[in-house]
Image: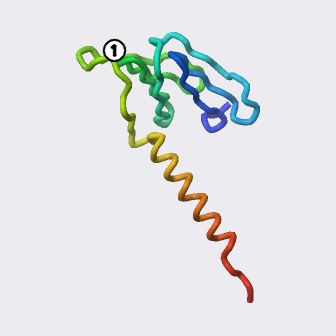
Amino acid sequence: MTIDQLVFIGLNGYCVALDRDSGEIVWSNNEMKSGYVTLLLDGDRLIVSTNGYIYCLDPLTGQIVWNNPMRGYGAGTPTSLLSVRGQSSQSAVQQSAEAIVAASRSSTAYTGS
């Protein structure tokens, strides 16, 4: 299994990886603090934030690589997670929208002789 075959979901303190073709659960991790979960795929690491805690998971197994309780920074949900290797959800949506527009323009372009 490779990273590009997985879809990552964060729900109430859980992080779950699904097979993108079948929807079957590949792995589930419930070892994190409960609450709203924010995810960022950062290359070969899955960064997970919940209630002020930051975790790094192996995206293929769901095992915790490291965690940081971020003491002194509060216990809320981050407004964003960014990385040069990963993308925020907003940038992924933007790129998808641009790809759809570009594809629709090329499919309607006149190619007659």
Q: Which element carries disc 1, helix, strand or loop?
A: loop
Percent x, y of residue 72 = 23, 16
* Quadrant of res 18: top right
- Residue 7 lies left or right of residue 31; in this view the side is right
What's under tag 1, amino acid-wise?
Answer: Pro
Taking 110 as reference, is 25 above or below it? Answer: above
Taking 73 as reference, is 39 above or below it? Answer: below
- Residue 113 lies left or right of residue 58; in this view the side is right
Percent x, y of residue 67 = 39, 16
Residue at position x 55%, y 55% from top?
Answer: 97
Instruction: Kindly tell me whether residue 100 is visible in this rendering.
Output: yes
Q: Give the residue number, with chain letter if any, for mark 1.
A: 69
Taking 10 as reference, is 34 above or below it? Answer: above
Q: Residue furthest right?
A: 22
Q: Quadrant of the C terminus?
A: bottom right
* Quadrant of res 24: top right
Q: Residue furthest left?
A: 72
Percent x, y of residue 10 = 54, 24
Residue at position x 56%, y 15% from top?
Answer: 29
Q: Tag 1: Cα neighbours inside 10 Å, few (<14), some, or many (≥20)?
A: some
Q: Nearer the viewer, residue 51 or 84?
A: 51
Coloring scheme of the render?
rainbow
Percent x, y of residue 46 = 49, 28
Taking 89 as reference, is 66 above or below it? Answer: above
